[in-house]
Amino acid sequence: MNCIFCTLDKSKRENTILEETTYFYVIPTIGSLVAGYVLILCKRHIYSMAELNDKERKEYENLIEKYRNIFKSIYKKYPIVFEHGSPNTENKTKASSIDHAHTHIVNYQYKNEERIIKDLNFNQIGELTQITRKENYILYIIY
């Protein structure tokens, strides 16, 4: 397997581990255009967070909440949290450019995010368990 996240070279400065948990790494993004942009990487090679088991999902939800609060404290606004997951099949087009589950947490200062979200016409879900493993999706948390 030739996955850049599975073979993360932790000796490189750009791969600094900000936090390591049982199932995840939190790292800064490479080439970020804004201050405050990190990735949550699943240690296990999966295609999307829809494949997380119950223990992983709980830790994932806790990390998202933790970093949302950190960003709110630093930037005075909650970050955008998103993941573009793909089904674990070879016959479907992948939504992400890296076939290893990762979630973006981004500081932002958009003024019209509610209109943008409405225009995108996303189907809203209440829990991560509602994400299906059979289709592409975008997980998006803003509030």
Image (cartoon, rainbow, N blue to C red):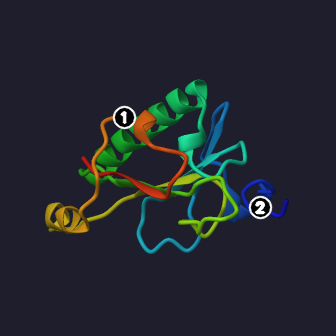
Residue at left 66%, top 35%?
23
- Is 94 left, or right, of 73 in this rendering? right
Q: Secondary structure at mark 1?
A: loop
Residue 49 bears which disc, if any? Answer: none
Residue behind mark 1: 127
* Label pair 2/1, CB-CB below 8 angstroms: no
Name the outermost residue toward the front: 91
The image quarter containing residue 55 is top right
- The image position of residue 78, as x and y in percent, is 28, 49
Q: Residues within 10 Å of mark 1 (few under 14, many from 20)?
A: few
Residue 33 relative to residue 119: left or right: right
Q: Quadrant of the N terminus?
A: bottom right
Disc nearer the start of the sequence (2/1): 2
Q: Residue furthest top?
A: 55
Vertical side of 130 occupied by 16: above or below: below
Residue at image location 54% in from the left, 30% down from the top:
59
Q: Element under label 2?
A: loop
The residue positioned farthest toward the right in the image shown: 1
Is 136 rendered above or below residue 143?
below
Q: Which circle, 2 or 1, is nearer the viewer? A: 1
Left or right side of 74 for 131: right
Which amino acid, by three-letter code, is at mark 2? Cys
Q: Is residue 127 above or below residue 107?
A: above
- Residue 30 at x, y = what percent? 59, 69
Q: Does 122 sit left or right of 38 as displayed?
A: left
Amino acid type shown at disc 1: Glu
Picture residue at 15% right of the left edge, 68% below the top:
112
Q: Give how far across and how far down residue 25 sits, in percent.
A: 64, 44
> How many numbered circles are shown?
2
Which residue was labeled with disc 2?
3
Give how far across and how far down residue 96 sits, in percent: 56, 66
In the image shown, does 101 or 36 lie closer to the viewer? 101
